[in-house]
Amino acid sequence: MITKLSDWHSPSPSSEQSDEPVLRAITQLRAGKAIIVQDAEDRENEADLVALADRVSPDVVNFMITHGRGLVCAPVSREIAERLRLDPMVKGNSDPHRTQFTVSVDAASCRTGISATERARTLRALADLHATAGDFTRPGHVFPLIAHPAGVLGRAGHTEAATDLARLADAPAAGVICEILGQDGNPITGRSVARFAARFGLLRLTIQQLIRYRAAHDSALLGRDLMPDLTNANPLISYSRYMEKALASCI
């Protein structure tokens, strides 16, 4: 459904400006850096640090632990979850946003799994296309999350943003995310996100920007007649009907 960046059609001049934030984010992620991804104010209204799992370093993990201060999780595609036998954490998911937590894991080669170095090792192992279920111990210190198969077009969450960005960066569909908490222990929002980004020189991207990018570029593959009306104030308003058609066309 979502293809590599090199497979997209060339954007029209009118779309280049709107494409730029996503393209700059992909460049940062490919370089092994973390970026900030924000979701909508009427959803979680949170900002997460996001990186690619296949090239995450202990330094990036340590930055997330020290300055992000939220839970370090690993969004993965359903295909990866099934191959590695990442079973759901609970039988009945009652999370308000239906976040698909699996049983936590450590790479089998880890000693305790808690250090930034060993968590980075586990994260990279999750993105290893040759890894098997036996390469991990359960429970552990990294929390995989299963992304919606349609990415941000099916669910506008940080989980899906991370796996979409990984695919666009020509990487395995596995990411690393960590919520950013303020000094008061609550998620930072609004101007606090801008100040955090400026303090550490981090690029910011919104999930809405990623939704619009994917909608614009997926249309080249699916046909404009399948796309939702993006003139609506809420770009997700028509996506349930769109996804029924898109999934039928692409799976």
Image (tube, helix red, strand yellow):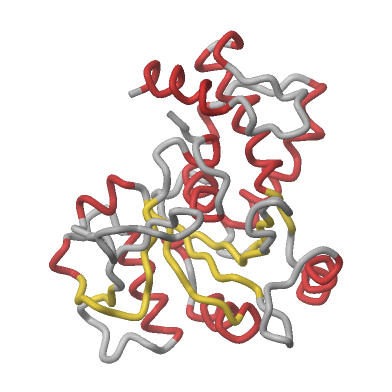
What's the residue at 74%, 57% (across, down)?
204
The quarter in which the N terminus is drawn is top left
> Vertically, is 173 above or below 5?
below
Q: How many marks?
A: 0
x and y, in percent, of residue 6 in the image: 53, 32
Residue at x 78% of width, y 34% of height: 18
Q: Position of residue 16 (x, y in %)?
A: 78, 30
The foreground one among 215 and 110 is 215
| Residue 82 at x, y percent in the picture | 22, 50
Residue 193 pos. (x, y %): 78, 67
Q: Is residue 60 left or right of residue 212?
A: left
Q: Seen from this angle, which residue lies furthest left?
A: 134
The C terminus sits in image quarter: top left
Which residue is depicted at the point 40% across and 59% down? 94
Q: Is residue 104 left or right of residue 35?
A: left
Q: Residue at x 45, y 17 (%)?
A: 245
Residue 165 sits above or below residue 149 on the image: below
